[in-house]
Image (spheres, rainbow, N blue to C red):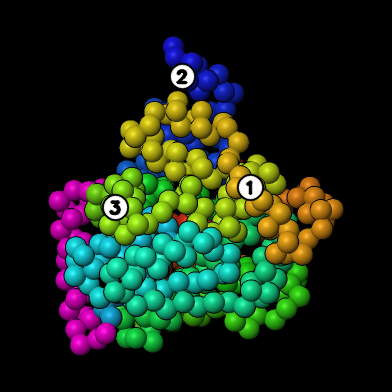
Amino acid sequence: MTELASLLEQTPLKVCTRCIYDERVSSITFDDDGVCNYCRQLDQLVEDYGTGQPKGEARIAEIIEEIKVAGKGKKYDCIIGVSGGTDSSYMVHLAVKVWGLRPLAVHYDNTWNTAIATQNIRRVLSALDVDLYTHVTDNKEADDIFRAFFEADVAEIEASTDLALAEVMNRAAYKHGVRYVLEGHSFVTEGITPVGRNYFDGQYIRSIHRRFGKRKMKTYPLMTFERMLFWSVAARIRKIRPFWYMAYSKEAARELLEREYGWEYYGGHHLENRMTAFFHSVYAPQKFNSDFRNNTLSALARQGKISREEAWEIYCQPPQIEEQLVDYFQKRLSLSDNEYKSQMAAPPRSWREFPTYKKRFERFRPLFRILADANLVTRSFYMKYCFPTPEGDNPS
């Protein structure tokens, strides 16, 4: 037995025999072969979407033609959210260079972007002559929302960013009469994160901010339940994730972006934004004992790009923390050393302790199934939010 194999064999935790999800992951189960339910879930998605197969390639080709037909006579035929990261940058390249689409790039600026991310957006869009719409939330207002979540002792400190981008893309699509939003998510390379401590919705953000925030929400684009239904049922804006249908290599995409556009790598998955970096490398691991690197590492192991043993060894090492990242976080949120340390040491709380739309999503599950089938909400939303989650979960 190799040293790496021995490391995995010696862990007291039950670990999936195909990836590195272990028994600490929210709602995990294992079959008789020791394979976790999340691996089986992804197998089903590959079957349903024909990912990387002729079936999937044919379907995305059909969708591209539908986008072109729907966009005739309009300045733009689709919306693409951009962050400066690999997936969204490559999505813009595909849309213009390969598919011949006319996208409007949309960016939600929570004012925590790295210089590299900002530069990547500029370089790719300038080279492809793609217009950019950016919604910038007032920096003090954005920081007040982040601090509210920090003081609430809940894990989803970055929830406001993810939901705001979705809202801003819908607003841009509606304003320009565009029916399609392209998203650069790949369940093959990222998996689908279990809800666990990764829950967010508009009611959750509003309830946390009302209790712990100090400023009014004026510039933050909050997506309420009613607005979500408007975008999907009335405006009928479709959310398309092309990587769910096609073969996609993040490594190959990165090489192309670097070669063609002078795009620069920012050091790791989700590290193109300082708040995201703080969440992944400091906040989640240190306060909640949650390390989301297992999503990407498990995906690499499933694809055979690294062995399970190599993935587990990396996972067992502390996350890389950007120099001065904690100092930057404290300065932005006006936290003294004692305030920061006290809050980090405070007992974690769950999203279940605050008002959310979760029960409403579950009650409307039949509707959201129809909307998911029509790409009017994402399939991952339906899978993660519209089914009950065990009350006793203690996710990693």
Can you tell which mark lies on residue 259?
3
Q: Is residue 64 visible?
A: no
Residues packed near mark 2 inside 10 Å, few (<14), some (14 to 19) or many (20 plus):
some
Can you tell which mark lies on residue 323?
1
Q: Which residues lie in the magenta part?
A: 46-75
Query: Disc 3 residue type?
Result: Arg
Q: Quadrant of the C terminus?
A: top right
Q: Position of residue 227 (x, y in %)?
A: 49, 80
Query: Disc 2 residue type?
Result: Ala
Q: Which of 244 and 138 is in front in this view?
A: 138
**Disc nearest the viewer among 1 and 2:** 1
Whole-number angstrom distance, CA of label 3 to CA of label 1: 28 Å
| Circle 2 SS class | helix
- The residue where tag 2 is placed is 5
First in sequence: mark 3 vs mark 1: 3
> Against 300, is 146 above or below?
below
Contact flag, marks 3 and 1 (Cβ < 8 Å): no
Residues packed near mark 3 inside 10 Å, few (<14), some (14 to 19) or many (20 plus):
few
Give the residue at the far right of this rendering. 338
Q: Where is residue 133 in the image (x, y as percent from the top left)?
A: 42, 78
Task: State left or right for residue 90 relative to residue 5.
Answer: left
Task: State left or right for residue 350 relative to residue 264.
Answer: right
Query: Disc 1 residue type?
Result: Glu
Task: State left or right for residue 34 relative to residue 152.
Answer: left
| Circle 3 SS class | helix
**Disc nearest the viewer among 3 and 2:** 3
Q: Which residue is drawn at 51% across and 32% down?
A: 314
Q: Which residue is drawn at 48% across and 47% down?
A: 268
The question of residue 292 being in magenta is answered with: no
Q: Can residue 248 be seen in this view?
A: yes
Whole-number angstrom distance, CA of label 1 to CA of label 2: 32 Å
Q: Which residue is drawn at 20% across and 88% down?
A: 73
